[in-house]
Amino acid sequence: MNNFDLHRKAMDFVRQKLEEQRWIVEEIVSGKDDYLQINRPESYKTYRIKVKALSQEAPVPFHTRSPDSMKADFFVICRKMEAENPEVFTASKKEVVDATHKHGSDYWLETEHYEKFERGIAMLGRLRPF
């Protein structure tokens, strides 16, 4: 599966999980980035989620853009997207920024760091809508 298809599959997977939690989900494209924006019908608060997809256990590349510069409130990392049950890790922007390091001109989130993040997307279900 190519990177575009892998990312698309991860976006659809996360969208489905969020909709199961009663979130209204909208896809936002901002320049080269795309996000899932979520809110609830009774809410005026929205959150942006950046989804990163991996086919196997590997570091998450952010290339030359620091996660701090991205317009995301949360990051969802989907690993083993080609498997029947992908692994999902969710973290706040601060957690991702604190765990990311620069190697050369690129930013990376190492496997051992994101494996410490909360598994699944239950964290997002606990967000307050106001």
Image (cartoon, rainbow, N blue to C red):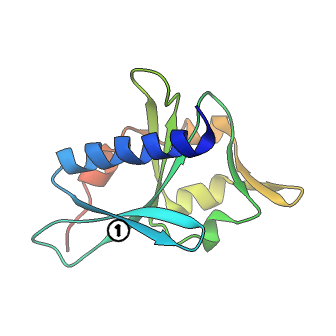
Locate residue 66, reporting x and y percent.
Answer: 69, 65
Q: In this view, does 28 lie above or below 54?
A: below
Locate residue 129, reporting x and y percent.
Answer: 20, 68
Q: Which amino acid does label 1 sit on?
A: Tyr
Q: Which SS class for mark 1?
A: strand
Q: Residue placed at 44% from the left, 66% from the top?
A: 73
In front of the other: 29 or 119: 29
Locate residue 80, reporting x and y percent.
Answer: 53, 27
Residue 48 lies in what quarter of the image? bottom left
Residue 67 lies in what quarter of the image? bottom right
Locate residue 112, reporting x and y percent.
Answer: 65, 35
The answer to whether 53 appears left or right of 38 in the picture is right
Q: Quadrant of the N terminus?
A: top right
Q: Residue furthest top?
A: 84
The answer to whether 100 appears left or right of 84 in the picture is right
The answer to whether 65 appears left or right of 43 in the picture is right
Q: Residue placed at 42% from the left, 48% from the top?
A: 11
Q: Residue placed at 80% from the left, 57% from the top?
A: 106
Q: Quadrant of the C terminus?
A: bottom left
Q: Residue placed at 58% from the left, 37% from the top?
A: 54
Q: Is residue 21 above or below residue 43?
A: above
Q: How many numbered discs sit on the rendered protein?
A: 1
Q: Which residue lies furthest to the bottom in this view?
A: 44
Residue identified by numbered label 1: 47
